[in-house]
Image (cartoon, rainbow, N blue to C red):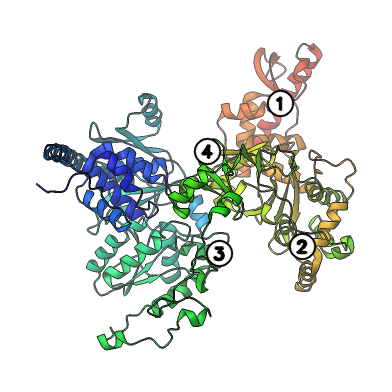
């Protein structure tokens, strides 16, 4: 037995404080080591330590903990990590009896854990095979080779070996009974109806909805082990127990290939495949890339492997870059990362480059990476020891930089950043007291200097435990009752107001200095006075009244090139400065809503695709008119801010948003007039030479004349057209009928005749038919329903009780005998005209 005294759970809490939790590999090693030593009793300590990382997710922690099954990494690895970061075990005296007891407890835990590992692994192996068989069934029976995918359309990539779902399929996984089942059609409803409430941990399911795609994941021998599902919103789903290690999906043919690509996700792999024509293996995620690279090298030893990695700049430790480099290094391949930034984001992959810059940019960058990454001869020992000609001491780059006793440059961590961005800063006691405000009732601290919210644990990592303790005990420490964003500046003195005014100063030039900007706005309004005046006042009102929440918004759509973005991005948003933001669909889809915090103006560029328009309609309505916003930032508590955001939506789509009939929220402007280059050159010159500040001054002095937050925008043709384009087929049918475009008399109609006319219209207009009961529900929004005894279908027929739809507002006349006779006459006329049209079509 070892002389080492085993650790207890109490020791573990102190030890973990010395290990950073941000690196995912370290996080996994620590979790495996703790579970190997303490079993499930160690979860709370690991989870508490994990919460100190910016990327922490409670759900992710629980899922990963359950996945720690195999023996391997032990507590020794955890102890070494702690010692490497300064931890020293306490050497307190211990009796021989106490030592024997602790060792016995440790051995007992290990025996129990080993039994758990063996049982878990046996069950996992059974379940992996069961999931593989179920996925094979789904792939062969329920996945179609043809279909539509909004995700693929949004990513601008083709379908290479993927399957489409045309109806809902559910894969249920029961690890207690050790079986998997596949449910389709009406069985899906039965499955969910029979599911115990609450759902037991042993039962999980994966739902493949219509409109989703499936990507088969196979090993090197070609066996299908699992499926990755990607739904319409781009959410990627994976079945529990589905094997991932070493599995891949290959786009193209590996046989005889001189170059093979490897990438993490499907869209990235497809962009590389489309740009270069190489076969590309999709590894599913960064952690699986080295294993897939090894299999590819063994399968195609003469091919050059190019690992097209993700550059995860926003993720701690950049796992995409790290694993891609490791994969290429293991097999002597070449690693390639995107060089051009993708529009609107920091994290990049090759699909970002494809969408933002085109396939040609992807091909050029990959060619450059391959050319630069060709292996060079290994230098001899003498050559390796010789100094490189381009090495320059830091003291020459930064004159006056301090040096160590041996003459090497010593970075001044308290000073400015060194070239390339390598540097740092220190936070002293006075700065803690002056610039940091604790939020009462939370573990959050506001950094007034850097204008950001941080967790107390993160601040402790920066300043150290001793300094943070002094700050916590100081009577001069600042505490705020709550955090608010109040541009009206009416909050009390104990509140922390995140608004500190606009930074732009208005120019006295006023209207004279922004004539071209104003003229451009007039052009965007189609030179229509009502729209132009309303738009100017809509821009001016929240600038004159900071914090005003407009109950309306602006939608500007049409052809590319008229300068829609120019005036909003380069003029209006710059006036707002840090309180303005440009968003895309990624922000709208994200569960994290930090982009909404401390913002007064939002420019939304192509935020909703046609396929997802109905899904996001309610969200957009709340953003435009809601009183409050739920701010959910990574690693911070959910909080609420008053909604001061005013939106402008820009799009090149023919139907940029879905609007309700009678909408009062949006000014809709269709723009298709593209001016010449000289026009934009003059406009940009005015903007860059004081035009923004002059426009700001003009907005501050613009008369409102009874205009306020609730003033409705003009109803113009393009808005009416957009409303009709947003209507369901049933309601649009009623609108077309009412306009007299159906050759059917408008008025009363028997329910069955009206539905029959709707179906015929759908066939002719290529519209989607609704089921009869759904059609009647839609009709009741625009027509009244009555039940009356009338002579039908002819004047000679007997009386029969009919369900009749009449124009809205006329249902109240149902007791008037003369009105009933008119209704009967209209119903018979509608039936006659409908039968006549049927006969014409048949002929």
Q: Quadrant of residue 111?
A: top left
Q: In this rendering, does residue 471 appear at all?
A: yes
- Asked if 334 appears above or below 314 in the picture, the reply is below
Looking at the image, which residue is at 47% across and 61% down?
A: 313
Q: Which residue is mark 2?
A: 673
- Asked if 786 appears above or below 835 in the picture, the reply is above
Q: Given this view, does label 1 or label 2 mark the residue nearer the observer?
A: 2
Residue 20 in the image: x percent, y percent? Answer: 37, 53
Q: In the rendered structure, find residue 783 and report the number of the disc placed on it.
A: 1
Q: Earlier in the sequence, mark 3 or mark 4?
A: 3
Residue 277 in the image: x percent, y percent? Answer: 40, 70
Residue 231 in the image: x percent, y percent? Answer: 45, 46
Separation of marks 3 and 2 at Cα, in angstroms: 24 Å
From the viewer's side, name the closer residue of 393 and 672.
393
Q: Given this view, does label 2 or label 4 mark the residue nearer the observer?
A: 4
Q: Earlier in the sequence, mark 3 or mark 1?
A: 3
From the viewer's side, name the closer residue of 608 and 17.
17
Q: Is residue 196 left or right of residue 409?
A: left
Q: Which residue is mark 4?
A: 442
Q: Earlier in the sequence, mark 2 or mark 4?
A: 4
Separation of marks 2 and 4 at Cα, in angstroms: 53 Å
Question: Label 3: how many residues lie within 10 Å, few (<14), some (14-19) or many (20+)?
Answer: some
- Secondary structure beneath label 2: loop
Q: Given this view, does label 3 or label 1 mark the residue nearer the observer?
A: 3
Q: Which residue is mark 3?
A: 356
Looking at the image, which residue is at 51% across and 72% down?
A: 418
- Secondary structure beneath label 3: helix
Q: Earlier in the sequence, mark 3 or mark 2?
A: 3
């Amino acid at each position: 037995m070892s002389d080492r005294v085993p650790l207890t759970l109490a020791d573990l809490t102190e030890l973990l404080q010395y290990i950073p939790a941000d690196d995912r590999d370290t996080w996994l090693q620590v979790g495996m080591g703790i579970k190997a030593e303490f079993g499930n009793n160690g979860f709370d300590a690991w989870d508490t330590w994990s919460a100190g990382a910016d990327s922490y997710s409670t759900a992710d922690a629980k899922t990963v903990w359950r996945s720690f099954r195999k023996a391997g990494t032990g507590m020794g690895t955890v102890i070494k990590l702690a010692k490497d970061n300064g931890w020293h075990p306490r050497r307190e005296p211990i009796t021989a009896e106490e030592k024997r007891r602790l060792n016995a407890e440790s051995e007992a835990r290990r025996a129990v854990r080993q039994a758990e590992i063996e049982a878990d692994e046996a069950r996992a192996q059974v379940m992996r095979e069961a999931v593989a068989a179920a996925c094979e069934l789904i792939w062969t029976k329920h996945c179609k080779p043809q279909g539509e995918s909004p995700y693929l359309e949004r990513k601008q990539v083709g379908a290479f070996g993927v399957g489409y779902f045309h109806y809902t399929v559910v894969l249920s996984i029961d690890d207690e009974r050790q079986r998997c089942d596949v449910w389709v059609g009406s069985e899906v409803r039965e499955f969910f109806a029979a599911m115990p409430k609450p759902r037991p941990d042993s039962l999980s399911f994966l739902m493949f909805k219509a409109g989703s795609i499936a990507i088969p994941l196979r090993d090197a021998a070609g066996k299908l082990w699992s499926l990755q599902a990607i739904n319409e919103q781009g959410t990627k789903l994976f079945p529990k127990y589905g094997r991932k290690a070493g599995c891949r999906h290959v786009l193209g043919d590996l046989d005889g290939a001189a170059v093979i690509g490897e990438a993490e996700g499907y869209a990235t792999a497809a962009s590389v495949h489309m740009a270069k024509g190489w076969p590309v293996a999709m590894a599913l995620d960064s952690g699986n890339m080295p294993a897939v690279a090894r299999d590819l090298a063994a399968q195609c030893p003469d091919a050059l492997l190019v690992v097209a990695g993700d550059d995860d700049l926003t993720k701690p430790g950049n796992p995409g870059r790290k694993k891609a480099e490791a994969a290429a290094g293991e097999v002597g391949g070449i690693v390639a990362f995107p060089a051009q930034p993708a529009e609107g984001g920091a994290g990049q992959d090759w699909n970002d480059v494809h969408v933002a810059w085109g396939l040609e940019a992807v091909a050029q960058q990959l060619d450059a990476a391959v050319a630069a990454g060709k292996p060079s001869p290994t230098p001899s020992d003498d050559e390796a020891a010789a100094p490189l000609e381009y090495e320059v001491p830091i003291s020459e780059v930064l004159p006056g930089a301090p040096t160590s006793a041996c003459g090497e440059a010593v970075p001044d961590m308290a000073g400015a950043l060194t070239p390339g961005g390598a540097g740092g800063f220190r936070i002293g006691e006075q700065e803690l007291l002056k610039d940091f405000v604790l939020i009462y009732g939370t573990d959050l601290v506001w950094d007034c200097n850097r204008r950001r919210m941080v967790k107390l644990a993160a601040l402790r990592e920066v300043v150290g435990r001793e300094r943070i303790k002094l700050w916590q005990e100081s009577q001069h420490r600042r505490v705020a009752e709550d955090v608010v964003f109040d541009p009206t500046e009416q909050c009390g003195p104990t509140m922390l107001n995140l608004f500190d005014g606009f930074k732009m100063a208005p120019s006295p030039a006023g209207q004279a200095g922004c004539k071209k900007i104003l003229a451009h706005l007039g052009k965007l309004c189609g030179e229509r006075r009502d729209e132009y005046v309303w738009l100017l006042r809509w821009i001016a009102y929240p600038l004159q009244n900071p914090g005003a929440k407009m109950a309306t918004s602006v939608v500007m759509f049409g052809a590319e090139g008229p300068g829609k973005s120019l005036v909003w991005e380069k003029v209006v948003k710059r006036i707002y400065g840090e309180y303005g933001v440009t968003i895309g669909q990624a922000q709208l889809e994200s569960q994290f809503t930090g982009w909404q915090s401390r913002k007064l103006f939002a420019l939304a560029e192509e935020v909703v695709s046609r396929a997802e328009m109905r899904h996001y309609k309610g969200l957009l309505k709340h953003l435009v008119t809601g009183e409050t916003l739920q701010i959910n930032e990574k690693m911070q508590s959910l909080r609420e801010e008053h909604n001061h955001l005013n939106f402008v939506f820009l799009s090149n789509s023919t139907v940029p948003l879905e609007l309700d009939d009678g909408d009062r929220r949006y000014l809709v402007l269709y723009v298709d007039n593209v001016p010449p280059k000289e026009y934009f050159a003059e406009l940009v010159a005015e903007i860059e030479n004081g035009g923004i500040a002059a426009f700001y001054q003009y907005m501050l002095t613009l008369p409102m004349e009874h205009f306020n937050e609730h003033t409705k925008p003009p109803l113009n043709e393009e808005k009416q057209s957009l409303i009709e384009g947003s209507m369901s087929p049933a309601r649009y049918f009623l609108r077309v009928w009412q306009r007299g475009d159906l050759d059917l008399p408008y008025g009363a109609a028997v329910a069955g005749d009206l539905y029959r006319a709707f179906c015929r219209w759908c066939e002719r207009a290529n519209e989607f038919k609704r089921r009869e009961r759904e059609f009647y529900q839609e009709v009741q929004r625009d027509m009244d329903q009555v039940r009356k005894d009338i002579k039908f279908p002819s004047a000679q027929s007997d009386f029969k009780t009919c369900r009749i739809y009449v124009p809205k507002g006329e249902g109240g006349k149902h007791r008037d005998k003369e009105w009933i006779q008119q209704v009967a006459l209209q119903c018979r006329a509608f039936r006659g005209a409908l039968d006549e049209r049927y006969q014409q079509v048949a002929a």
